[in-house]
Image: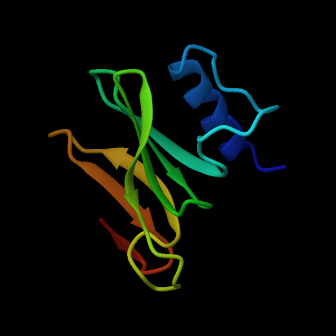
Amino acid sequence: MHLRPVFCALMLASLMGGQLSFGQQVDVPLYPLDVAVHADGQAYVVDRNLPGVWQWKQEKLSILFEGSRKFRTPLNAARSIALDQDGNLLVGDSSTRDVY
């Protein structure tokens, strides 16, 4: 069992006030791999099954960027996410071997 996706799902559930339900079909990340949380409470989650990046802002989850399902296209296989010191979002993609 890979613990990183489980940790990301639990982190996301915590941000959502515990309202994440695994027993019902909801519009949430299906395979969260990493999460980055901004000081203002916004959170960003990379999702392997989207593929792309979800944004948690003002208590609402929405798609920030949806990548193509075609291999070797940007954010087809986003694996990691971070915020730099200026608050810029950085996403590592194993499909293109690049950082966006």
* 85 left or right of 41 in image: left
The x, y position of residue 1, in whole percent, is: 85, 49
* 58 left or right of 87 in image: right
> How many numbered marks, from 0 up?
0
The x, y position of residue 13, in whole percent, is: 61, 25
Q: Quadrant of residue 40?
A: top left
Relative to 1, say whether 85 is above or below: above
Q: Quadrant of residue 62?
A: top left
* 6 left or right of 77 in image: right
Give the camera-side residue of 91 and 64: 64
Relative to 72, say whether 12 is above or below: above
Q: Quadrant of residue 18?
A: top right
Q: Name the residue located 59 percent from the left edge and 41 percent from the top edge.
A: 27
Q: Name the residue located 28 percent from the left edge and 23 percent from the top edge.
A: 39
Spot the residue most to the left: 86
For the rendered model, the colour scheme is rainbow
Relative to 73, say whether 29 is above or below: above
Q: Name the residue located 60 percent from the left edge and 38 percent from the top edge.
A: 8
Identify the image quadrant of the C terminus.
bottom left
Give the camera-side residue of 24 and 33: 24
The x, y position of residue 81, in whole percent, is: 42, 51
The x, y position of residue 80, in whole percent, is: 47, 55
Q: Name the residue located 53 percent from the left edge and 21 percent from the top edge.
A: 16
